[in-house]
């Protein structure tokens, strides 16, 4: 399990990644993050929704209601915007550098 | 599922009810609900499912800081009040309320006894001289006032550890919503005590009205009865008033408390002069000039004038602030 402190700067990136392929909603995103991380990272509910709030405020995602055919209930879906995509690329580049730098200080003992 | 809804309601209880907040709460609930049913489908028990959902909820403060409603966090770092301190303060207020209420009631009962003994001696019903009757009255007054003063001092000392609350503090959202619930639960009790207290005050001069229809000293006994009824009323008002105040102090923000404190200080100072003065006039005109049938009027008059003063002062103060 990764501590939430370590990954803090990349929660937004994780969420944006989940929206690259298709629109999604809160629970699906959190479930996919869990599966993709092989249960090593579970994003807390409040982390997820404060990230949604922040991303939407910055114009990186936008939310809309969608009726679910099978359930007949309304869900809040999120879609990545062109600005969000740009931000995602920036974060990916940033991670490459971060990884390179930190790796220089990592050694097997 | 009830537990989860209750948990979420609790978390949001102290937050402003904006449409953004309501939507957020609904989204969170939908998410938690889905997680819950999926866990149940996977064969988890009710308790396990609820436990997992709640443990993965996170920290509400994270959302609050993102929504920018926790600004007072950054501006002024006031100390957080612990649950024990808050509970202790409410309990201490309740206890001092009991003591102060009882003390004030004792003073009033003492005054009633003073009137009673003096009049009884005057009428000769006690079989003692008038001077002895007055002395008996004064002794009983003193005997009751001394413990009352002790109670006042003791209550002041009891509240001493909570002095620092005046310098400001902040509450966690959990504690705040807990206190709000307790305050809400107490409201009907307070209203009832207020109605009873004020009702008793209004009814208290009846004895004198009736007494004044008869001859001589009957209205004097009415005055004594009035004071006893008022003593009961004051006890109710002070005791329940103190409990209410404990919640008000804990739940109002610092700026409000400051302005209010200044206002309370001025009104309190005026009250400390006006009411004893009214009591002096009442006692002197009664004991020396035997005007019991009419002199009680000083209390309603003082009450009305004092109420007018408080209201006008309030209005002027609000005007100045805005």
Image (tube, coloured by chain):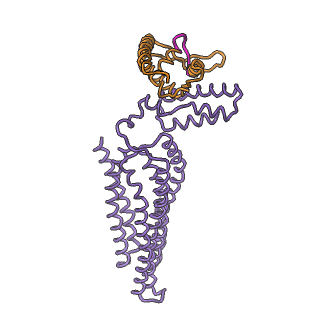
Chain colours: A orange, B purple
Q: Nearer the viewer, residue B188 or A39?
A: A39
Residue B254 image point, x, y percent: 37, 45
Residue at the far front: name it: A109
Position above or below: B245 against B116: above
Q: Is residue B155 magenta?
A: no
The structure residue drawn at horizontal position 46% and vertical position 54%, both measured from the top left corner, is B89
Q: Quadrant of residue B3?
A: top right
Q: Which residues are magenta?
A: A18-26
Q: Position of residue A101 (x, y in %)?
A: 41, 18
Q: Is residue A23 magenta?
A: yes
Of residues B316 and B168, the one nearer the viewer is B168
- The C terminus of chain B: image quadrant: top left
Q: Nearer the viewer, residue B74 or B295?
A: B74
Residue B158 drawn above or below residue B127: above
Residue B18 % position (x, y): 47, 30
Tell me: B14 left or right of B306: right
């Amino acid at each position: 399990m990764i501590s939430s402190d370590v990954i803090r700067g990349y929660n937004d990136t994780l969420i944006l990644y989940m929206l690259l392929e298709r629109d999604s909603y809160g629970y699906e995103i959190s479930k996919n993050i869990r599966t993709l991380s092989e249960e090593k990272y579970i994003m807390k509910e409040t982390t997820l929704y404060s990230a949604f709030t922040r991303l939407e405020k910055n114009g990186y995602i936008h939310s809309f209601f969608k009726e679910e055919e099978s359930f007949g209930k309304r869900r809040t879906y999120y879609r990545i915007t062109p600005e969000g995509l740009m931000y995602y690329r920036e974060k990916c580049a940033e991670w490459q550098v971060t990884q390179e730098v930190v790796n220089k200080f990592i050694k097997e003992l | 599922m009830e537990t989860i809804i209750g948990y979420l309601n609790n978390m949001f209880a102290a937050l402003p009810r904006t449409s953004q907040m309501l939507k957020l709460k609904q989204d969170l609930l939908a998410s938690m609900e889905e997680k819950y049913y999926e866990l149940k489908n996977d064969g988890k028990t009710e308790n396990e499912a609820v436990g997992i959902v709640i443990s993965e909820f996170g920290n509400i403060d994270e959302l609050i800081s993102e929504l920018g409603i926790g600004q007072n966090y950054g501006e002024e770092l006031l100390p957080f009040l612990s649950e024990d301190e808050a509970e202790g303060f409410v309990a201490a207020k309740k206890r001092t309320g009991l003591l102060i209420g009882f003390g004030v009631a004792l003073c009033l009962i003492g005054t009633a006894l003073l009137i009673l003994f003096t009049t009884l001696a005057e009428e000769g019903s006690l079989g003692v001289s008038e001077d002895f009757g007055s002395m008996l009255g004064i002794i009983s007054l003193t005997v009751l006032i001394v413990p009352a003063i002790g109670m006042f001092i003791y209550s002041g000392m009891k509240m001493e550890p909570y002095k620092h609350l005046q310098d400001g503090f902040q509450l966690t959202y959990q504690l705040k919503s807990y206190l709000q619930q307790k305050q809400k639960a107490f409201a009907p009790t307070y209203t009832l005590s207020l109605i009873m207290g004020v009702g008793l005050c209004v009814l208290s001069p009846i004895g004198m009205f009736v007494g004044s229809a008869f001859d001589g000293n009957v209205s004097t006994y009415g005055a004594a009865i009035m004071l006893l009824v008022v003593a009961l009323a004051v006890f109710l008002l002070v005791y329940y008033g103190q409990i209410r105040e404990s919640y008000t102090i804990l739940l109002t923000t610092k700026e409000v408390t400051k302005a209010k404190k200044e206002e309370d200080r001025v009104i309190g100072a005026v009250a400390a002069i006006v009411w004893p003065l009214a009591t002096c006039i009442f006692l002197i005109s009664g004991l020396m000039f035997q005007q019991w049938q009419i002199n009680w009027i000083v209390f309603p008059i003082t009450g009305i004038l004092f109420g007018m003063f408080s209201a006008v002062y309030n209005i002027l103060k609000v005007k100045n602030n805005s």
